[in-house]
Amino acid sequence: MKSQLKIYNTLTKETSVFEPIHKGNVGMYVCGPTVYSNAHLGNARTYVSFDVIFRYLLHIGYKVRYVRNITDAGHLEGDQDEGDDKFAKKAKLEQVEPMEIVQRYTIDFHEVLKAFNNLPPSIEPTATGHIIEQIEMTKKILANGYAYEVNGTVYFDVEKFSKEFNYTALSNRNLDELLNNTRELDGQNEKKGRLDFALWIKAKPEHLMKWVSPWGEGFPGWHIECSAMSSKYLGNEFDIHGGGMDLVPTHHTNEIAQNLACHHTQPAKYWVHTNMLTINGQKMSKSLGNSFLPAELFEGNHSLLEKGYSPMTVRFFMLQAHYRSTLDFRNEALQAAEKGLNRLMNACKLVSHLKTSETSSFSVEDIKESVYAAMNEDFNTPIALAQIFEAVRYINLINDGKESISETDKTQLENLINTFVFEVLGLKNEQEAGADKIDGLMKMILGVRSDAKTKKDFATSDFIRDQLKELGIEIKDHKEGTNYSLT
RNA sequence: GGUACCGUGGCCGAGCGGCUAGGCAAAGCUCUGCAAAAGCUUCUACAACAGUUCGAAUCUGUUCGGUACCUCCA
C-alpha cells in the first residue's frame, strides 16, 4: 500500500495522517444510543459508518479496541437538569420498570445493527454499570475545583473551566455569544452559569432509578458516563472518539471539558463525526417525527416508500455517500442502490468462474491501489465503490471474452473483491442465506422446465415460470442454465 | 437573531485549480421460442453574477436558495 490512512479531525478541522498513540493498536470510543425508544435509520447510519471504520482499521492490521456505550440512565428531557429522565418518563407512560424499557430497546438496537451486518464492538458498557466510576470522576472534578454542589446536585463550572481551557475548541463557537445567548428563558435556576451542566443530579422521592452518592441519592448526568467509561477502558488518552455531528456542540464539548478538568488530558487524539441522514432535505430525528424505523423500511411499511428494501440495499446506499456528507433518503435512491448492489453481487459470484489467459489486458494492481487510496483518504467509501465497479465492468467484459486476465491476476482480483465487498464494506449476499433446501427443490423444478423447453413444450415451461412468479420466485434464462431469485 | 455548512447532469452522489468518479434512469446494441433479466456502448453537469489565474465545479467577493447547530437528538 503506497498511501497512508488520513482522518478528518473535528478538533483540528483538518485531515491528517493517522498515527496511533500505541503502535499497532487503536482505541476507539463511539457514543452509543440512549435506549428509551427504537433506533431509527439515522442512528443506524452512524453505526454503519463506524462499523466500516472499525472493519478497515482491522483490515489494515491494527488491533482495535472498539468501545461503544449504552446510555441507560440519566439522560434528561431538557437541559434544565430537572424533571424526569427519558427512561422514567417512558416507563411511567407504559407502566413498566425503567429497566424494562432499557432491556427492550437495547435488544432492538442490537437486532437493527445485526440486520445491517455490523460487527459487535469489543466492549459495550452501560451507564448504570458504571455509577461508581462516574461518582469517582465527579468527586475528582469537584476536588480540582471545576464543579460545585447545590442541594445535592453537582454542576460543572464552565466559566471557571474556560478561564484555563478552551471550552469551545471542538465546536469552534464563540463562548461569549453562547454565554449571552438569550434564546433560553432564564427561570429560577440553581446553576451559576447558563452553560453549566450537571455531573450528578439529585433524585426526587418519586424517582425510580437512583443511587447513593456523597451528595445524597441521585443519578449521573448525561455527559459524565462517556468520560468515565472511555477512561476506564481506553485510558485517559486514546486514539479515536466518534459520534454523530449533533453531539459536537454539547455532549462532546462537555465530555472534553470533564476529562480536562479531571485528568488534565484531552481524551481523544482524533474526533470523528458522522453527518446526518436527511429526508426531503430535512434531518431525520425522533423529535421532528420524520424518522424511519429500520423495520418499516425492510417491510416497505411507510407512506414514503413504494416497497421494502433489504438491509444490505440500505447499507450499500449509505456507503455510496461519504460519512461526513448529509445523505438524502428517497425511494428512487433506494431503488438505484438495490440494482447497483445486485450488479455488484453478480460480479462477485462471477469472478471465481472467469476463464484465464496468458496475460491480462488491464491492471488489477492499479484498481487495487485506487481502492486503498480511496479508503485511506478519510474512509472515502463512495470512491472505493466506484473503483470496485470499475473492476465489475472488467469482470463482465472478461466473461464476454472482450478482455482477458492471467491466473495470478485473477486470484488477486478475486481477493480484492471479496476482501473489500464482504470484509471491509461489510456487505453480504442476502439471496444465498439459508436457502439450501429451496435450492435443491428449484434445481429439480428448473430441470423439468429445461426438459420441456428442449422438447419445445413451451406451454409447460411457461406454466412453471408463471406459477413460480406467483409464489414470488422469479426465474431468468441465461446462456448456461437458469437463475432464480426470491422477490 | 447569532454561528457554521451546502447548492454538481432526469435522480442519488464523488471531486476541493488543469487529466472532468460511480450507481440508477434513458437511448442504441448483444443475447433470446416468447418473456424477463443480464452484459456492452453512448449521454459531459457543476445556483447566479463579478473577480484572481495561462487555466476554476474547485480560490475570492456579492446575490439568491437550502440545511444544521445555538433545546433532547446519531
Image (cartoon, coloured by chain):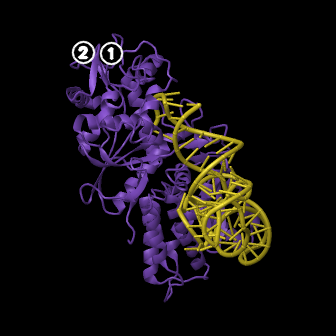
Chain colours: A purple, B yellow
Q: Quadrant of residue A444?
A: bottom right
Measure the alpha-carbon separation of dots 2 and 1. 8 Å
In-front residue for pair B30/A59: A59
Relative height, residue A420 to residue A257 (above, below): below
Callout 2–callout 1 Cβ contact below 8 Å: yes
Q: Is residue A249 visible?
A: yes
Name the side, left or right, on which A468 lies relative to A220.
right
Q: Position of residue B38 (x, y in %)?
A: 64, 67
The residue under label 1 is: A203
In-front residue for pair A203/A348: A203
The quadrant the N terminus of chain A occupies is: bottom left
Name the side, left or right, on which A106 lies relative to B49.
left
Name the side, left or right, on which A463 lies relative to A336.
right
* Mark linked to residue A216: 2
Residue at x-position 47% and y-position 38%:
A246
Residue at x-position 61% and y-position 45%:
A308
Find numbered disc 1 in the image and state the secondary structure of the residue it sits on.
loop
Find numbered disc 2 in the image and state the secondary structure of the residue it sits on.
loop
Q: Residue furthest bottom?
A: A358
At label 2, the amino acid type is Gly
Sort mark 2 into few (<14), some (14-19) or many (20+) by Cα contacts within 10 Å: some
Relative height, residue A357 to residue A391 (above, below): below
